[in-house]
Image (cartoon, rainbow, N blue to C red):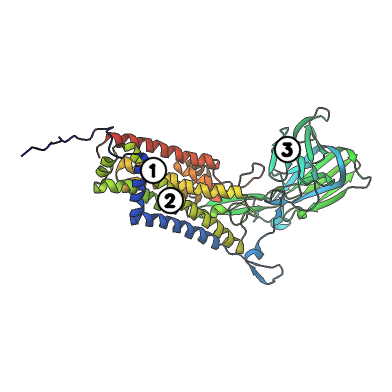
Amino acid sequence: MTAGTVTPYQPYRPGQQAGRDGFAQVLHAEWTKFRTVRGWVIGLLAAVLVMLGLGLLSAGGSSHTCQTSGGGPTRTGRACLPTYAVGPGGEPVDDSFYFVRQPLAGNGSITVRVTSLTGLLPPANPNASGPNGPADTRPGLMPWAKAGLIIAGGTNQGSAYAAMMVTAGHGVRLQDNYTQDTAGEPGAVSAASPRWLRLTRSGGTITGYDSSDGTHWTQVGAVHLTGLPSTAQAGLFTASPDYNVVSQSFGGTSTTGGPTQATAVFDQLGRSGTWPAGTWTGDAIGAGGSGPPGAGAYHQNGSQFSVTGSGDIAPVIAGHGNEGDPDFTITDFLLGTFAGLIAVVVVATMFITAEYRRGLIRTTLAASPRRGRVLAAKAIVVGAVTFVAGLVAATVAVIAGTALGNKNSYVFPVSWLTELRVVAGAAALLAVAAVLALALGTVLRRSAAAVSIVIVAIVLPYILAVGSVLPVGVSDWLLRITPAAAFAVQQAVPQYPQVTALYSPGSGYFPLPPWAGLAVLCGYAALVLGLAAVLLRRRDA
């Protein structure tokens, strides 16, 4: 009888290779684990369903009822919504001002001096009574009250244009096609400090200049207006945006205020090019504002013009609480992202903590001794499946929400690139949050603690900010430094510095640019994932 060979037991040492320990095999093993655990799959499906449910609930939850003037029949739905002019870029725009114009055939220029800009505001207390009741006005100017020169494709609302203007509080500006704004000479206009303005047309290119003395000119900028007809309308204009005071409180906003009026005085008018010999024509474009103190007028005394107008030439601002805002942006249809994120965080945390709780982590690390590979494989699997689930949920929510929202309300139009960024960004937000939860679960080895920390860090600041629980300044601060900054990737419409509005989280606006906000969450996830990798290598299973 012969004795067999006995191989002595050799304990595992860090760095030791096991049979087939390629990363592809580890990745496949972790994917197999995930898809074979019914609870985790159900958790992802729950995230998708809750995102869809809350998004569609938001889309279908707005209804309108109104009555026609004079006690006419009651109307509902879209019949109660205002009609917005559409700008050259397809965006809804405000286009209401007083226009003193003549046709400009072909190329040419127009120059003028502005010597005064005054105005009227609604009463500080709209409920106070006076000689004429609550409609009494008081002297004053809105900061974005404006007057100057304009060359436009026509007198229809939404026409392409370029304008050189003085403003009450923001100096000289060159603005074009509602969304573009370029700063010129600073300071307010007065008889002692007049401003000279000039617009020059060469084909479709309009160039704006300003001067303080009419001799030394500075080019503010040049813009190209696509489709500008050979004969454009050019001349003087005045506009003054509505005065709105927005009060924000938990669960909503309230707005008070009313229309305003501005009056500008022009002289030293000069022209070159092909202009008619006839008189000037005055038009209240878009009725010149939303109500009293008047649509506007002009008066000519020799070479001096006095032009009075109301309204604005600017993009319509989306967001709850802004005057005349559209009801929805596609961001509203992703309201359920925060709820879906909670389900995703639970699943991602349990993807690692369940192995610690059941002691299976020892088997996993014995089969794949390179612990960093195991963590990386888990992160890729949970991030990938979450991204796919989030992409499906966000896509369906936006498409179905837009269709449902447009039946009774107005959905703010955005480009397809913006839709793609918002949808993919929502999916990326969920995926990175899942990786953060997985990493925190690895560090803490406890599901409840890891889930609670992630929810407090991401979901709670978001709810406090968009629910208008905190002051706007505090909300902005939270959405800059916490992982909740990632929700900025869902902002669908831009902020316009040339339009005063309620740019707050509760109105759908975030303090960081979209991808910068997502980068904050990625930074937190990378930091915690690195810590998890170090601790996983150093600690016993």
In terms of secondary structure, where does tag 3 sit? strand
* Farthest residue, direction top: 216
Relative to the observer, which residue lies in front, 429 or 270?
429
Type of amino acid at the residue the image marks with label 2: Leu
Q: Residue at x 67, y 42 (%)?
A: 498
Q: Residue at x 54, y 54 (%)?
A: 332
How packed is label 1: few (under 14 Cα within 10 Å), some, or many (20 or more)?
Answer: many
* Farthest residue, direction right: 277
Relative to the observer, which residue lies in front, 489 or 76?
489
Type of amino acid at the residue the image marks with label 1: Ala
* Farthest residue, direction front: 1
Q: Position of residue 31 (x, y in %)?
A: 36, 48
Taking 226 as reference, is 92 left or right?
Answer: left
Q: Residue at x 45, y 42 (%)?
A: 483
Q: Earlier in the sequence, mark 1 or mark 2?
A: 2
Q: Position of residue 371 (x, y in %)?
A: 31, 37
How packed is label 2: few (under 14 Cα within 10 Å), some, or many (20 or more)?
Answer: many
Question: What residue sits right under mark 2 in the picture?
Answer: 341
Relative to the observer, which residue lies in front, 117 or 226?
226
- Circles 3 and 2: CB atoms closer than 8 Å: no
Question: What residue sits right under mark 3 in the picture?
Answer: 173
Question: What residue sits right under mark 1 in the picture?
Answer: 379
Taking 197 as reference, is 385 left or right?
Answer: left
In terms of secondary structure, where does tag 2 sit? helix
Cα–Cα gap, marks 1 and 3: 51 Å
Q: Earlier in the sequence, mark 1 or mark 3?
A: 3
How packed is label 3: few (under 14 Cα within 10 Å), some, or many (20 or more)?
Answer: many
Relative to the observer, which residue lies in front, 269 or 517?
517
* Farthest residue, direction left: 1
Cα–Cα gap, marks 1 and 2: 16 Å
Give the foreground label among 3 and 2. Answer: 2
Type of amino acid at the residue the image marks with label 3: Arg
